[in-house]
Amino acid sequence: EDQVTQSPEALRLQEGESSSLNCSYTVSGLRGLFWYRQDPGKGPEFLFTLYSAGEEKEKERLKATLTKKESFLHITAPKPEDSATYLCAVKDFNKFYFGSGTKLNVKP
Amino acid sequence: GAVVSQHPSRVICKSGTSVKIECRSLDFQATTMFWYRQFPKQSLMLMATSNEGSKATYEQGVEKDKFLINHASLTLSTLTVTSAHPEDSSFYICSAHRSGLSYEQYFGPGTRLTVT
């Protein structure tokens, strides 16, 4: 069964059009939820770690939030350079589980 | 901080030969490193977890004799693809977990392997 599910699979936005990406998880004993950005042909770039429900973190136009069952990555007034695949991962006691990612395309 | 490098970034080899990929944590010590494989338009597939000074732990379905992993020091892990075949062609990415309390993984830039 999937431990981490990301939605939508793909998202097309106009520049300046804010939106949110979703990451839902089913692991118990959460040790951390991680957001990464991956550009084509490159390794994932670390963005945020969230450890407990209610926690929020921000970086430029990105804000990550966490509840007991899901996390949201909010993108405010995105720019074309925000286009990338955003990966979510969770860690339980033993392992990391990666979602399949949301491919974001921001058009000028 | 938290920079991970991989070498080479691209490699083309002939079927039947072996290829070694290096993963280095440049500015921190990594007791644990991970090796992933990524197919086009798919997410990361964990191949193995590499712990410094001990044998790697392979995921189910990954041939340990084909994908040799050596974590020789706190800053270096290597993946050797032995007797490579065209189906081994893929994007291989390593990551390193910084020693300490946090669980973040920091990823290398990846290695594109093409087996002809």
Image (cartoon, coloured by chain):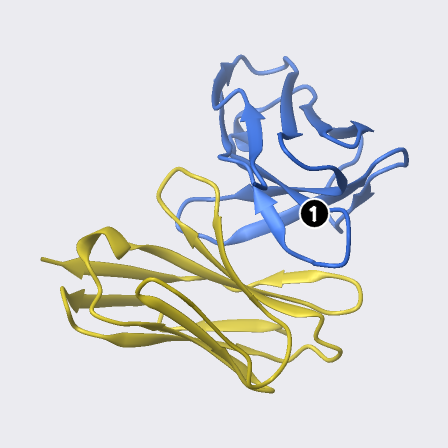
Image coordinates of residue B12 in percent, x first then y, are 48, 16
At 71% from the left and 70% from the top, the residue drawn is: A31
Q: Secondary structure at mark 1?
A: strand
Quarter of the image containing the N terminus of chain A?
Answer: bottom right
Image coordinates of residue A103 in percent, x first then y, are 33, 60
Looking at the image, which is closer to me, A40 or B81?
A40
Looking at the image, which is closer to me, A63 or A6?
A63
Q: Is residue B72 left or right of residue A2?
A: right
Looking at the image, which is closer to me, B16 or B55?
B55
The colour applied to the residues of chain A in this rendering is yellow
Image coordinates of residue B32 in percent, x first then y, are 76, 43
Q: Is residue A75 left or right of residue B78?
A: left
The colour applied to the residues of chain B in this rendering is blue
Looking at the image, which is closer to me, A104 or A35?
A35
At 68% from the left and 77% from the top, the residue drawn is: A27
- Chain under callout 1: B
Q: Is residue A84 left or right of residue B35?
A: left
At 22% from the left and 64% from the top, the residue drawn is: A78
Q: Characterize the local packing of mark 1: few (<14), some (14-19) or many (20 or more) Cα atoms within 10 angstroms.
A: many
Q: Is residue B104 above or below residue B78?
A: below
At 68% from the left and 19% from the top, the residue drawn is: B83
Q: Is residue A47 above or below residue B69?
A: below
Image coordinates of residue A96 in percent, x first then y, are 67, 60
The furthest residue to the right:
B54
User: In the picture, residue B54 is in which quadrant?
Assistant: top right
The amino acid on which the numbered mark 1 sits, given as a three-letter code, is: His
Say which residue label 1 marks. Answer: B97
User: In the picture, residue A108 is in which quadrant?
Assistant: bottom left
